[in-house]
Amino acid sequence: MKKIRKMIKEELLKEVENINLFKNSLTTLEGKDIPDKIDGWFNCASNKLTSLEGAPKTVGGHFDCNNNKLTSLEGAPKTVGAFFDCNNNKLTSLEGAPKTINTYFGCTNNKLTSLEGGPKSVKGRYHCYENPITSLEGAPEVASNFQCYKCNLTSLEGAPKTIKKHFVCDNNKLTSLEGAPKSVGGVFSCRFNPGPNGDGFTEEDVRAVCNVKGKIFV
């Protein structure tokens, strides 16, 4: 703990805007003298954290808590200027996540059954693949790239209405595309789903529910 405190204080004295706690075997961020506001980025990835209590409240750049043992995002920053990466944890809820993300939000490979409580606005990519979610309720209304493959989706209800680039919902349990985005600017991919007759979807199925400007993969 003293080593971590010293590291942070030295960085602050040098007016370094970033704090890197990557792979330090940390089990908590509390008691580390972490300031409430970081102008640059904050990296606490690849530790043994079970909570984000003690994390900064505002991060001007990106916030990376990937590859820990987090079950909750309570204590996470309220404001993040760039991306927020909480992939590869044990999250069962997105409650506590920042409400606005400017570049990328990743919550892949967790134990999420719902996207409720997550960010409402994601200006860049939103990746929630490899989670046992069954619907997309709680997803933002707009995203540039949305990937929800390898989940347990039985419905696309709740999906963003507008996808500026690509939408990928491969490897789910979808029998209908109802609830799909109304507009996709790039690729629409819905491969390896049962479809209405057990043999997948057709390009006509996709075009019936979505205005796709790029390629369609079925």
Image (tube, helix red, strand yellow):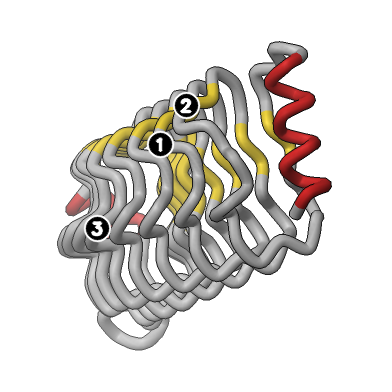
Label at residue 107: none
Depth check: 209 or 147 in front?
147
Considering only vertical position in the picture, is 174 above or below 191? below
Residue holding disc 2: 37
Considering only vertical position in the picture, is 135 above or below 127? below
Q: Position of residue 110 (x, y in %)?
A: 51, 71
Residue holding disc 3: 117
Depth check: 129 or 26 in front?
26
Q: Residue furthest bottom?
A: 198
Identify the residue at horizontal 20%, vertical 62% (top origin).
137
Residue holding disc 1: 57
Q: Is 81 placed left or right of 13 in the picture?
A: left
Q: Position of residue 183 (x, y in %)?
A: 25, 37
Identify the residue at horizontal 55%, vertical 47% (top origin).
85
Measured Cα–Cα span from mark 3 to mark 1 = 17 Å
Q: Residue furthest top?
A: 15
